[in-house]
Every structure is written in C-alpha cells, then in structure tokens.
Image (spheres, rainbow, N blue to C red):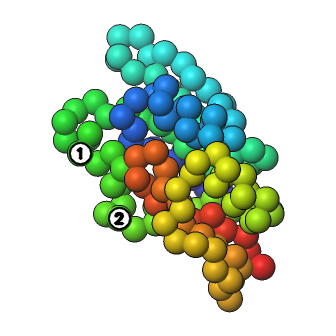
Amino acid sequence: MRQSIAHVALVVRDYDEALAFYVGTLGFELIEDSERPGEGKRWVVIAPPGSSGSTLLLARAATPEQAGFVGNQSGGRVFLFLQTDDFWRDYHAMRAAGVVFVREPSAEAYGTVAVFEDLYGNRWDLLQYG
C-alpha cells in the first residue's frame, strides 16, 4: 500500500490576501484557483517552489466558529515546517520581504531553524536539515 498527504487545509480570512502573502511575499507557486459555483468558495492550492509533495489548500473561513481559528490552528505551536536547501538565502529574502521572525536562527543537532509567523499569526519553522 502507498499513501501520502495530498493537501493540508489552512483556514484563512480571505483568499486574495492569503495569496498576496504566500505567493507574493513567500514566493509560493499557485497550483490551482478555481471557483466552486453554488458553494460560494474557491479551491485554492499553493506550494513552495520546487515542491513535489504536499500542498496547502487555502480554505476561507465560512462561519464565525471557523474564523476564530484563523491564525491559531495549532494553539500557538509551530504549525507548518518549510524545508529549504539554503537557509540563509531564504531567511534573508524573507526578512527583506517583511516576514516577521519570532525566534531567531539557531543551529540545532538536526540543522538550522528559525520560527516565523504568516500574515495571520500561524507559526512556521524555516529549516534546513544538516
């Protein structure tokens, strides 16, 4: 048997503002952006450049309950892990683009890591395994 995680849903406030951050600021690739007629939503899929694995499905909050989880999908813990082949290139580019790092770079036994927040406050690890 072979299985894999295809998408991870990320609850967002607005599709276009999320795309501006993930595609415009972080440089992710837009894989698909399709209207869902009759449902009042879109199917928006993004991925980091060069990714061949899982993607993010941007899911606009549709209820007040869902909106309460925007930016806090993991209770304040690091939620997603962005692996890179060049930590310092991406760290400096992200800082120059205005990305907020809440934990500065550190060398750990497994590699180099820093924690940043997306536009909603979800925490991400930027990491390069070493």
Q: Secondary structure at mark 1?
A: loop
Q: Image check: 31 left or right of 123?
A: right
Residue 28 image offset from top left, x and y in percent: 67, 41
| Residue at x 40%, y 29% (from the top left corner) | 14
| Residue at x 46%, y 60% (from the top left corner) | 123
Q: Image check: 124 left or right of 13?
A: right
Which residue is disc 1 drawn over? Answer: 68
| Residue at x 22%, y 33% (from the top left corner) | 63
Query: Badge 2: few (under 14), some or many (20 or more) residues near its Cα, within 10 Å?
Result: few
Q: How many marks?
A: 2
Q: Image check: 41 left or right of 25?
A: left
In depth, the one of 63 and 76 nearer the eye is: 76
Query: Badge 1: few (under 14), some or many (20 or more) residues near its Cα, within 10 Å?
Result: few
In depth, the one of 17 and 81 nearer the eye is: 17
Q: Identify the image quadrant of the N terminus.
A: bottom right
Q: Is residue 54 above or below residue 114?
A: above
Residue 91 image offset from top left, x and y in percent: 69, 60
Tell me if residue 54 can be seen. Answer: yes
Q: Secondary structure at mark 2?
A: loop
